[in-house]
Image: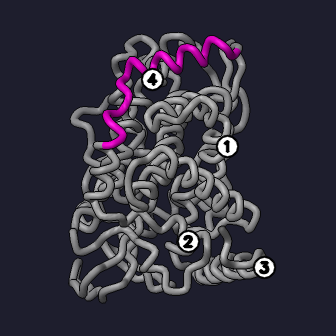
């Protein structure tokens, strides 16, 4: 239920967006990332690396793109994801989505209640069945990946058949939940996101035998699992089709799928920015950070940090040893998401490489607007000549 009027919500979103534009116009790297307006990401990543391991942005948040420091921050128990209490003058949208800082015990209870993730074979079976119903020309995201992952996650959450269509609609509406943590969406998208989260919450109140925290964990894990898994698989296919020899190598040996997924997580992470809150005064990288300060780890920059590897800007799933990376690490909610993402992305890659070995791009890739966290692909036409 909305406690703000449409105009109040709209004003808060416009104010936040306006400040991001103002700071970005002044050259602030974090604000430029959050503005998410077709910026040259390579240039931005170089600027972040050149600025040193940790710098303060004009909005007061600290930003790092350093691999080692980023790993320390993500795993420091004094620096944790946000909760609704961290939004001093929050709006309806932020109150619903600033929940990734639920205690680790809650996420573990939900994982125990939900049971094990589907195995590779189960995901492959759903993918094969879906692929058999579409022709040689299709949209990778809307025709294959999203329907497959929605079905897999619905099974995982034991969603009844009668609720599957509503579950699908709510997951799609709530898909921008990760981006909306840092970039205010347009009012219509914000309202749809709120409705999607509320719809999933109502569903899980019927399905989950537990307290409100368990319901919240179940609710948020649905769109996040679907969107991050779809994003990882789509990023992998796009990268492979941009490198035909790599796609051919996978078609020749589908057993390489796990290596492709891991390199995709490093090179083109499905969650590019992770924001955290310092729970106490602390000092790191020579900087004093006060309690309550926001710290943003640019996972993409850290994964490509030139100070910790050679030519990490290049996509190469077959290099050995595989470079270290920070994707899907450093928070209990990510520990819940990561196994399904890795398994489902590898399974869909194996099915595509086996059943569509001559797959080719079929048109321009379309990405989600105002998506600095995921840069999610929403449409990707492909075909088999």
The relative height of residue 10 versus residue 192 in the rendered view (above or below) is below
Q: Is residue 298 visible?
A: no
Q: What residue is disc 2 on?
A: 94
Instruction: Give me the disc on residue 323.
Output: none
- Is 12 in the magenta? no
The relative height of residue 356 versus residue 310 in the rendered view (above or below) is above
Q: What residue is disc 3 on?
A: 7
Q: Disc 1 vs disc 2: Cβ atoms closer than 8 Å?
A: no
- Tell me the CA gap for discs 1 and 2: 21 Å
Q: How would you rate the neighbour count of disc 2 (Cα within 10 Å): few for under 14, some for 14-19, many for 20 or more?
A: many
**Residue 110's x, y, as percent?**
34, 49
Identify the magenta region.
113-134
Q: How would you rate the neighbour count of disc 4 (Cα within 10 Å): few for under 14, some for 14-19, many for 20 or more?
A: many
Q: Disc 4 vs disc 3: Cβ atoms closer than 8 Å?
A: no
- Tell me the CA gap for discs 3 and 2: 16 Å
- Tell me the CA gap for discs 4 and 2: 33 Å
Quarter of the image for residue 52 reads: bottom left
Depth check: 240 or 95 in front?
Answer: 95
Q: What residue is disc 4 on?
A: 123
Task: From the viewer's perspective, tell me whether residue 334 is left or right of residue 360.
Answer: left
Quarter of the rendering occupied by the N terminus = bottom right
Q: How would you rate the neighbour count of disc 3 (Cα within 10 Å): few for under 14, some for 14-19, many for 20 or more?
A: few
- Magenta portion: prevailing SS class: helix
């Amino acid at each position: 239920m909305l406690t703000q009027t449409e105009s109040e919500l709209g004003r808060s979103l416009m104010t936040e967006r306006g400040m991001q534009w103002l700071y970005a116009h002044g050259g602030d790297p974090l604000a430029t990332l959050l503005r998410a307006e077709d910026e040259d990401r390579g240039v931005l990543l170089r600027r972040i690396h050149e600025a040193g391991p940790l710098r303060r942005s004009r909005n007061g948040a600290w930003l790092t793109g350093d691999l080692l420091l980023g790993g320390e921050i993500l795993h420091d128990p004094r620096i944790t994801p946000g909760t609704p209490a961290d939004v001093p003058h929050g709006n309806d949208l932020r109150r619903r989505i600033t929940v990734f800082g639920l205690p680790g015990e809650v996420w573990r209870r939900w994982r125990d209640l939900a049971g094990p993730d589907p195995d590779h074979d189960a995901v492959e079976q759903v993918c094969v069945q879906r692929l058999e119903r579409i022709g040689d020309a299709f949209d990778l995201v809307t025709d294959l990946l999203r329907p497959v992952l929605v079905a897999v996650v619905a099974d995982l959450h034991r969603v009844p058949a009668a609720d599957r269509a509503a579950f699908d609609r709510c997951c799609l509406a709530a898909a921008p939940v990760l981006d909306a943590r840092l970039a205010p969406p347009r009012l219509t998208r914000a309202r749809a996101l709120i409705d999607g989260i509320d719809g999933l919450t109502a569903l899980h109140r019927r399905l989950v035998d537990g307290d409100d925290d368990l319901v919240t964990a179940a609710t948020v894990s649905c769109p996040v699992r679907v969107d991050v898994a779809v994003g990882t698989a789509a990023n992998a296919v796009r990268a492979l089709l941009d490198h035909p020899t790599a796609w051919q190598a996978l078609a020749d040996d589908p057993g390489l799928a796990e290596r492709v997924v891991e390199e995709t997580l490093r090179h083109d992470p499905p969650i590019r920015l992770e924001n955290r809150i310092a729970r106490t005064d602390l000092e790191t990288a020579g900087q004093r950070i006060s309690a309550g300060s926001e710290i943003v780890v640019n996972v993409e920059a850290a994964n490509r940090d030139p100070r910790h590897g050679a030519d990490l800007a290049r996509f190469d799933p077959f290099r050995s040893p595989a470079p270290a990376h920070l994707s899907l690490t450093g928070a209990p909610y990510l520990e819940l998401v990561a196994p399904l993402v890795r398994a489902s992305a590898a399974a869909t890659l194996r099915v595509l490489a086996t059943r569509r070995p001559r797959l080719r791009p079929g048109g321009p890739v379309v990405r989600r607007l105002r998506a600095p966290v995921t840069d999610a692909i929403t449409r990707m036409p492909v075909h088999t000549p």
